[in-house]
Image (cartoon, rainbow, N blue to C red):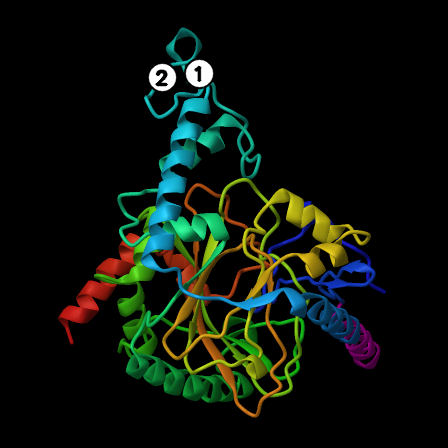
Amino acid sequence: FFPPHSFSSSPAISERRNHCYQRSQQGFLGRCNVSNNADADVMGMLDGDRESAIVGRARLEEELMNPMQEILLMANPEERALATKRVKENLRKERLSQPKASGGFGGGKGKKGKAKSGRGGGGFGVGSSTKSKEKETSFSLLADKSGFGAVLREEGVVRIDQAISPQTASDILKYINQKKLDTEDEVANRKAQVESRFARVLLKKQRWDLLLPLEEEDGSNNAALRGLDELLGEGGIIGEIVESNFGLDAKLYEFASLISDPGSERQVIHPDIPYQESVPLLTCFVALQDIDASMGATTFIPKSATDMHHKTLEDHSKRDGMLASTPNKLSLLNVGDCSLFDARTLHAGGANKSERRRCLFYFTFLNPSANDPRASNNPGSIRPELIEQQITLRDLRERLALHRKNQ
């Protein structure tokens, strides 16, 4: 029933995305692509079997990982300063190790004064043309004033407390809860296609991935935009971290809300994208209410954005040993706190065993040096009109500044 899929040919996977594929005891699970003529009852049975396999595997992983679990905490100033120092030294070593023929940071020339270009379309880290792009968005110590960007670069995940105010978080929560109801009505009355309003999720029970607009149809601003202003606008700490890693040309890749109601199941540990040498995507989860362990908080495995960790996860003879022996962090966020993580970092959303809804406001930025992983059947969790706009961090900041001015 569940043929394994290789990372090299599969789309990104995620807690919230419709294009995620997840592992069962038989291997990675691909999306169940069926024809329009497929028998609905049969496909429903297959979906049920697949979800049962995933849930069973996820529960086993939870048992394996619990003894090594700690709480994800915000790095203190001393920790951030040390991370910055180490990152600075690593960047210096990287510059020194680069061959002069590739141009390097000093603009050195190759043979006969020409830089040798690689083949196009080779994917991340393939060919010197891709490497040249990577240098354009090399980590910026100047932009990383707080040092959180350096921590993210080392750990693969970072927590920021009070990234937005409790009042803003409360306003966004009210907005999203109402938007979900309005959107369901819109889809039911055929005023919008479901795929333009919700991204599909693999574990469907009590879980929704609601795609959000930047502004309403009447042109008015919404609470989510106010939240973005606090996060990415003037003085926004998340904007600083994204800029330090990707620069101002970072592209908005996802913009949505993940809603998990009581009864939603735990996921298996997974990355959001296949391993590649450079960071392709950064995702920010913002808590719109306090999240305790019973509500299905996200578990992260720090420093797991490596080829070794990804390969071990794929090796059935080694993955359980890795999960049982590797420290992991539970993201118990308070209202307004956020976690920002590298898409290659291994993580999983937990089961909501509480009697309360867990709602995350989230967005993802794409490294402008990376190939866009979107496909027609894999658009990411974002409304179609926002894809067409190709919004960069620079564009978004300009829009947020105008929004602030008009308030």
Relative to 279, does residue 337 appear above or below in the rendering? below
- Counting other residues with Cα less than 10 Å from the Cα at mark 1, is it few (<14), some (14-19), or many (20 or more)? some
* Residue beneath disc 2: 108
Where residue 76 sits, quadrant-wise, is bottom left
Q: Quadrant of the N terminus?
A: bottom right
Q: Nearer the viewer, residue 360 or 354?
A: 354
Q: Amino acid at mark 2?
A: Gly
Name the spot of residue 323 as percent of width and height, x first: 69, 59
Where residue 56 sits, quadrant-wise, is bottom right
Q: Residue at x 57, y 92 (%)?
A: 355
Q: CA distance from mark 1 to mark 2?
A: 7 Å
Mark 1 vs 2: CB contact within 8 A: yes
Considering every residue shown, the one lying at the far bottom of the view is: 355
Q: Find out whether residue 158 is within the magenta segment.
A: no
The local secondary structure at tag 2 comes to loop
Q: Residue at x 40, y 84 (%)?
A: 173
Q: Is residue 137 visible?
A: no
Q: Is residue 223 visible?
A: yes
Q: Which residues are magenta?
A: 35-50
